[in-house]
Amino acid sequence: MLKLQDLTKAYRTDEVETVALNNVNIEIEHGEFVATMGPSGCGKSTLLNIIGMLDTPTSGHYFFNGEDVAGYSEAQLGVIRKQHIGFIFQSFNLIDELSVFENIELALLYHDIPASERKERVAAVMDKVGIAHRAKHMPSQLSGGQQQRVAVARAVVGNQSMILADEPTGNLDTAHGQEVMEMLQKLNEEGTTIVMVTHSPSHADYARRTINLLDGHVVTESMRA
Amino acid sequence: MLYTNYLISAWRNIFKHPLFSAINILGLAIGLASCILIALFVRDEISYDSFWQKAENIYRTHITFSVPGRDPMYIAMTPGPVMEAIKRDYPQVEYAARISIQEPTVIVDNKYFVDFITLTDPDFTKIFELNLISGDVSQALTGTSSIILNETLAQKYFGGTTAVGQTLTIDFDVFKKDYVVAAVIEDMQKNSMVQAEAIIAIDEPAWIDQPYMFDAWFSTNSQLFFTTPSGTSIEDLASTLPDFVNRNFPKLPFGGEDIKTSDMISMEFMNIQDLHLNGNDDGEYHETGNKNTVIVFATVAALILFIAAINFMNLSTARASSRAKEVSLRKVMGASRKDLIVQFLGESILLTLLGLLIALTLVELVLPIYNDVLVKELAIAYTSNDIFMIVGLAIFVGILGGAYPAFILSHFRPAETLKANKSAETKTSVKLRYGLVIMQFSVSIALFVSTAVVYGQMLYAKNKDLGYNKENVLIVKEIYRDVVQEKLHFLVDEIGRMPGAVSVSWSNFMPGNSNNNNQIARTEGQSTEDGVLLGSRTIGYNYFSTYEIPMITGRDYSRERGDRSVSTKDLREGNFYTGSMIVNQSALGRLNLGTPEEAIGKVIYVGAGQPEENLTATYEVIGVVPDIHFDSLKLTIRPEIYELEPNYGSVLSARFTGNPNAFASQVQALWEQEIPSIPFDYDFVTDAVAKQYNAEQGQANMFAAFSGLAILIACLGLYGLASFTADRRTKEIGIRKVMGASVFDVVKLLVWQFSKPVLIANLIAWPVSYYAMSIWLENFVYRIEAFFIIGFCLIAGIVALLIAWGTVASNSMRVASANPVNALRYE
């Protein structure tokens, strides 16, 4: 599905150059569930942003479905992103002024999908993540776990083939964290590729492969049997 | 010190949020500057003549002639004999003086000048205080051979030498006489309807051959001022005016037996302080103001300040959440709500005072141009109360704009804001902000529409077909003077032979200047009492062809065809003959002459001399012209007769082709050679007509400038609000972009957010401005159709929307093209 080759990302300020990712080589296949771990500042989020095409590498190649997107413009990346990639954030990032239904629908709004079909798809995905009864609620009226389920629903409503989750359970208690992880696992079993950044080893265990990063390098890769 | 802490906090806040502060201070500065400028104008306009010691008790008499079939003729002058009658009939009248301003030739030491000379009665110095520089004014007007000069004229005539005691000669054409300078006075204050540069006493016997000047009951050539002792009720005095008129005025020669003189002639008294703003241009010597203009500008000033204050409220409340933490901490430290209100009000006053500093700089920079446009000498007197009033105004605006934000900000509860760290915005404050933006734009759009209508009307008036061709006509003035009259035909012939000359004629009026001469006329079979009052003008040969006015029927006056006029002198001597007459179309109806074709050859009788002489001149109609706008477009065209005056005129008109200035200088060369004693004074008809609109043009420009500023301030506010909102919505925009929204989608979203209030503002502004401006247009006899206002409304709406988009779009672009990662990384 994707392949990072000699990928480097450096941030430059006036005096200092900080290398967030250094010569990273990673390959992820369709249907994989990959967890990325490492201490704070090791480059996990940068890696996820580059994979999610929200950021571009300083050098190296990024093949997405065989296409080298490393030098693509923001607009070109946007087109690929909205077709293939869904996002889940630690802080949910729901829009406070929109209802649950509208938040999920947002992911379809920019896809030229007719209103009736949008309605069906949002209803279906709300059902799937178990928040159908909360459709008209505002995010502030939901618990953290419920908010994250809305975020998951939003990430998959457009039939994206890959979900990038940045510490999806970081703001949740154990029970709700568990719930979200099970949902991700279920999605993975249905064929969605998942790349997740996490601090929790137990949640990393849901993944079949774990990539450990340290100071911008891939240190180890371990496969779960 | 708590207050030092407030000050530090306020000062740092200003620099911490440069955009917010800049917009606020700049908006307030422009608002205050506009307000100060308008206030100076308004104060000057309402201050007219209030400085006289007896201001409360000085009155001027006005007269209105209401003749059947004509618009009432209101005049700021009074027939000369009224003064003596008033003094006799009203013992309450203390002092009374007539004022007539003439423009004779003044000869000093063989040098010729043309200046305004005020002819008045001895009481003048009792009514008006003159600030004496040298000499003695007390006896200056009791004789008829002294003159009082103001400083400017004394300097002009006598240079550095002492003027008092010197002699100068004044040539009134009617008579020529020496005057000894009795006193030199300071120049009179500009904000007065009494402006005297040189003052002499009215010498009635010297004017005896011109009874219309001071001795005729039906001619008005002077203004009449009088005083009463304080405490006299002017209403009581005025209530007996109809009796006064019936008792003193001769019976009108028409209208029939049952008509009382007071039915057609009414008089009124007006206090001197009201003259400027209630002036009617007829019979005024000085530019009058307009009460409505003053009210309109005062309103505009208030609106501008209001818009600036709204900016302040909007930006402060929008930014409130970012200060929630400071508020909460202060509360935790023990600050009461009152403390915080004081703090925030202090901050807004500080901002306003900074704005005021810039405003005063702007005012001082703009004042020279402003004074030029308004033809005034306005200035801020920093050492007087002005400065307290200005600072007071600034503090008022600071409180006006700061009160609501202070209320909102001081309201935050520490527990909520500190813990949740979430947006502290309430729905009400968001709604209020939109409401205020709607109000700002309603005002801006209404001002835009009003400006457009004012300009539209002015353009219409300027470009209206006046009935004559005003292009390429040179006007030579001063030809009524004796030295010129002798050479009138010679000048006309010489100018007519010049290269480029097309046609030359003369008249007793100038197109674009109003003319109030009237004569009583009747047709065959009508009795004297059936006579109608017609406007009357005198013209030379070929006048209509010079102005390219097509005759409806008949022909223009021609020397070759032997057209003649009937002279009053001949009538007095018993020489009777029939003259030629040209009338306009409206006159046909008034005289029952039928169609233009039927009118040709018919006889009309026109009153001549003074009414009591009962003289009648006989004329045959030889031509009919269309109704022509020789007067201002503010007046309806009168029914008029155009009498031939073969040997006399006050202005000469020459139609030419080619370069106007080249033609004028040829004429000037001829004039200077033939009439060296009178300075050459000329104009072009296009310019003379345009001058009628000078005051309106100046005020329209001023109105446009202030409307523009109001819109600018509103846009500044919108810009600030948009940038703030865009920042606040950064997270949402980030999410939308991650979801696949393009930059364009996001810009659209933000721009639409600000289009809504502008659209709603249109719905409010349109009906209001339509209503107001259609009433305003009713002031004009000839005006643009009301449906133009609808067009202007649409244009204003579109322009407002475009301006709002332009203002918001740059911010939106910035936020929309930002990388969403930055927005979403931190929460």
Image: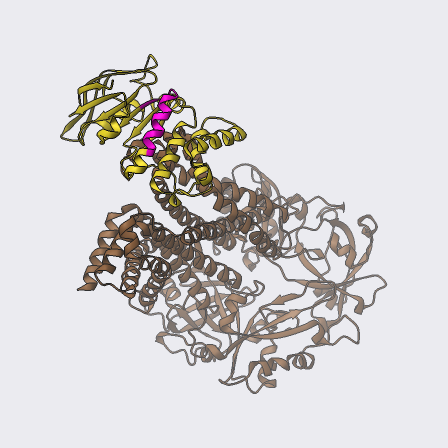
Chain colours: A yellow, B brown
Q: Of residues B322 and B716, which is closer to you in this image?
A: B322
Q: As displayed, is residue B761 above or below residue A98? A: below
Quarter of the picture containing the C terminus of chain B is top left
Q: Which residue is drawn at 67% across and 47% down?
A: B544
Q: Which residue is drawn at 28% across and 56% down?
A: B414
Q: In which quarter of the image is residue B207?
A: bottom right
Q: In this view, does B625 lie to the left or right of B350?
A: right
**x, y percentage for residue B721?**
38, 46
**x, y percentage for residue B13?**
25, 52
Q: In this view, does A127 lie to the left or right of B81?
A: left
**x, y percentage for residue B735?**
36, 34
Quarter of the picture containing the N terminus of chain B is bottom left
Q: Of residues B520 and B71, which is closer to you in this image?
A: B71
Please say whether residue B781 is visible from this viewpoint.
yes
Q: In this view, does B253 lie to the left or right of B462?
A: right
Q: As displayed, is residue B625 above or below residue B750? A: below
Q: Which residue, as the protein is rendered here, is positioned at the far top?
A: A66
Total labels: the figure holds 0
Residue A191: within the magenta?
Answer: yes
Q: In this view, does B67 lie to the left or right of B123?
A: right
Q: Which residue, as the protein is rendered here, is positioned at the far front?
A: A225
Q: Residue at x 49, y 47 (%)?
A: B668
Q: Which residue, as the protein is rendered here, is positioned at the far bottom?
A: B91
